[in-house]
Image (cartoon, rainbow, N blue to C red):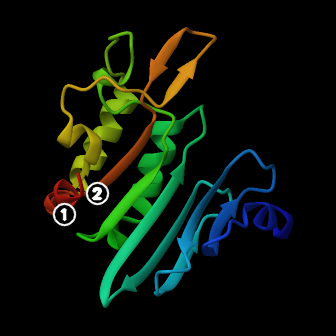
């Protein structure tokens, strides 16, 4: 809403792209720096689970997809989004967000097995030619993005994915 956008105004960030559901239980935002000339086309869902912006920076096309998956059914939600947007995902795509699910057994302090839904999601990610950037460059690292005080567990549920052919670009940024 306009009110939510107003709260997000931050000096130096010229454009705010957002998508949120009516119930305010989901929402995603992408901020664009005023220093970047980025012509865009936007696609979002009405539930607020994703927003995708496509544009070009210095004549180089790029797609940025921000995903929020609900706590319940996260794997199915992400899988549906990736399947729906499969044709939009290419070598210059970055996907980031709060996936609310693990993509590796190293993503949690307790080493329980990956369940079938997560395994199916990982398979979908593979078939869309995506890789987990963090896990690619830090295959054995155990750093976390979330702590559940209820369960006393640390987890890595926020992820950044890219097309597998772009990994060298991110390696240079390391």
Q: Residue at x 35, y 11 (%)?
A: 112
**Closer to the observer: label 1 or label 2?**
1
Q: Residue at x 27, y 70 (%)?
A: 90
Pointers 1 and 2 in contact (C-beta within 8 Å):
yes
Q: Nearer the viewer, residue 87 or 161?
A: 161
Task: Tell me where residue 122 sits by quadrant.
Answer: top left
Around disc 2, counting alpha carbons within 10 Å, would you say few (fewer than 14), some (14 to 19), or many (20 or more)?
Answer: many
Q: Position of residue 49 (x, y in %)?
A: 59, 54
Which disc number belongs to residue 162?
2
Decide: is 62 above or below 102.
below
Which disc number belongs to residue 169?
1
Around disc 1, counting alpha carbons within 10 Å, would you say few (fewer than 14), some (14 to 19), or many (20 or more)?
Answer: few
C-alpha gap between disc 1 and disc 2: 10 Å
Tell which residue pokes out farthest to the front in this image. 11
Tell which residue pokes out farthest to the right in this image. 3
Q: Residue at x 39, y 30 (%)?
A: 102
Local secondary structure at mark 1: helix
Local secondary structure at mark 2: strand
């Amino acid at each position: 809403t306009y009110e939510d956008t107003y709260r997000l105004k931050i000096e130096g960030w010229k454009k705010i792209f957002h998508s949120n559901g009516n119930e305010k239980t989901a929402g995603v935002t992408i901020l664009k720096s005023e220093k970047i000339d980025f012509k865009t086309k936007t696609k979002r869902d009405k539930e607020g689970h994703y927003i995708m912006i496509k544009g070009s920076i210095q004549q180089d096309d790029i797609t940025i997809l921000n995903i929020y998956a609900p706590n319940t059914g996260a794997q199915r939600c992400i899988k549906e989004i990736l399947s729906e947007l499969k044709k939009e995902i290419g070598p210059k795509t970055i996907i980031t967000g709060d996936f609310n699910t693990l993509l590796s057994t190293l993503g949690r302090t307790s080493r329980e097995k990956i369940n079938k839904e997560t395994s199916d999601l990982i398979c979908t990610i593979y078939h869309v030619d995506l890789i987990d950037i963090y896990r690619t460059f830090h295959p054995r690292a155990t750093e976390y993005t979330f702590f559940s005080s209820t369960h006393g567990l640390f987890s890595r549920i926020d992820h950044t994915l890219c097309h597998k052919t772009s990994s060298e670009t991110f390696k240079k940024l390391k």
